[in-house]
Structures are given as structure tokens and as C-alpha cells.
Image (cartoon, rainbow, N blue to C red):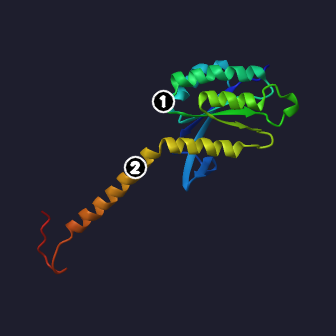
Amino acid sequence: MFPISKLWFMMPTPDLPPKNTIEVDGIKVRIQIWDTAGQERYQTITKQYYRRAQGIFLVYDISSERSYQHIMKWVSDVDEYAPEGVQKILIGNKADEEQKRQVGREQGQQLAKEYGMDFYETSACTNLNIKESFTRLTELVLQAHRKELDGLRIRASNELALAELEEEEGKPEGPANSSKTCWC
């Protein structure tokens, strides 16, 4: 069996345990990760994941030219099925297998540049750039949604201020023992 490229989707979810939380700029972000393993038999399921994805890792095996060539197909699928503005990072995995390398680092960097993506070489075995790549994708997703997050913060702040104002206006004026209260 030949190694093939794969996609990892990153989506927001409210029900994940803390171990799937990344903190970026003081914001705790819970992430849900889907690994499609790049297998063709999962292709119809994969297309469903695109719709909710906010971040996508496009992963190839540096020791397999074939897996690298599949990246172009995955990029095409992402462009077709993922929401506009989805954040993408290209990953060259198995960086610990330098002696088996078939895809040069420069090739990965160039492809990432052509598609406007960040690029990392990683190793799941040695943990090289794993945290860094996940943190970066989380940063990119947050940056893309910063306006939306700021809007939510402003709305929440305004609602709190309005609630406090309504509470203040609802308090009766005059002596505390006054039995006459006007709520109009």
C-alpha cells in the first residue's frame, strides 16, 4: 500500500474535553479534529466535513512523491466544497524519515506559497512542529473570525450594560420604605 495524502479538518465544538483545547492570545479554543486518512473510500463522507470546517491541514508524506501529487486534488476539493475563507496549512509529514525523503522541503514551501498557505514539516513520531502547526492554524481561524468575535464581545457587553440600566431604572425613587412604586 502506498502512503497517500490526507486532510485534517478543524471545527468548533462545545462538547470536547479540555485536552482538545488550545490557548491563543488568552483565548481558549476547543477544537474538533477529523482525520480522513486520505482514503478514497471516505471521499463522500469527507465532502460533508468541508461544510463546517474552519481550518484544514493538507498533509502529505515527505517520503512519497505520490502523496505529494495528491495534494493538488485535495486543494481542488477544498476550493470546491469548503466555505469561503477556510484556513489551510500544508504539512509535509514524516520529517523524521530524512533518509527516505522523496519530496524536498523547498517543493513543499513552493506549493504552499502558490496556494497562499503556511507550510510546516512535521513528525508525529518525534513531535516535531505538531503543537506549532495546530497553534498556527488556530491563530489563522481566530484571525479570520476576529471581527465576528469582537462583535459578539461588544453585543455581550452592550446587553450587560442595558440590563444594568434597566435594573437601575426599575428601582423605585425616594425613601426605601415608600410603598408607592411607579414602573412606567
Question: Along the polypeptide, which appears first: circle 2 or circle 1?
Answer: 1
Label 1: which residue? 84
Q: Residue furthest right?
A: 99
Image quadrant in which the N terminus is located: top right
Instruction: From the top left corner, tell me how far across and down residue 56 is, in percent.
Output: 59, 33
Instruction: From the top left corner, tell me how far across and down residue 144 is, in percent.
Output: 50, 41
Nearer to us in this view, 48 or 94: 94
Could you tell me which residue is drawn at 58 percent across and 44 percent down?
A: 138
Nearer to us in this view, 6 or 68: 68
Instruction: From the top left corner, tell me how far across and down residue 128 is, in percent.
Output: 76, 43
Image quadrant in which the C terminus is located: bottom left
Could you tell me which residue is drawn at 59 percent across and 31 percent down?
A: 116
The local secondary structure at tag 2 comes to helix
Residue 107 makes an appearance in the image: yes
Residue 60 as seen in the image, left or right of residue 17: right
Label 2: which residue? 152
Could you tell me which residue is drawn at 75 percent across and 19 percent down?
A: 66
Residue 36 as seen in the image, left or right of residue 62: left
Rendered view: 57 above or below 184: above
Q: CA distance from mark 2 to mark 1?
A: 21 Å
Mark number displayed over residue 7: none
Residue 13 makes an appearance in the image: no
At label 2, the amino acid type is Leu
For mark 2, does the 10 Å Cα neighbourhood hold few (<14), some (14 to 19), or many (20 or more) residues? few
Instruction: From the top left corner, tell me how far across and down residue 140 is, in percent.
Output: 56, 42
State the image quarter where residue 115 is shown.
top right
Residue 122 as seen in the image, left or right of residue 8: right
Nearer to us in this view, 32 or 78: 78
At label 1, the amino acid type is Glu
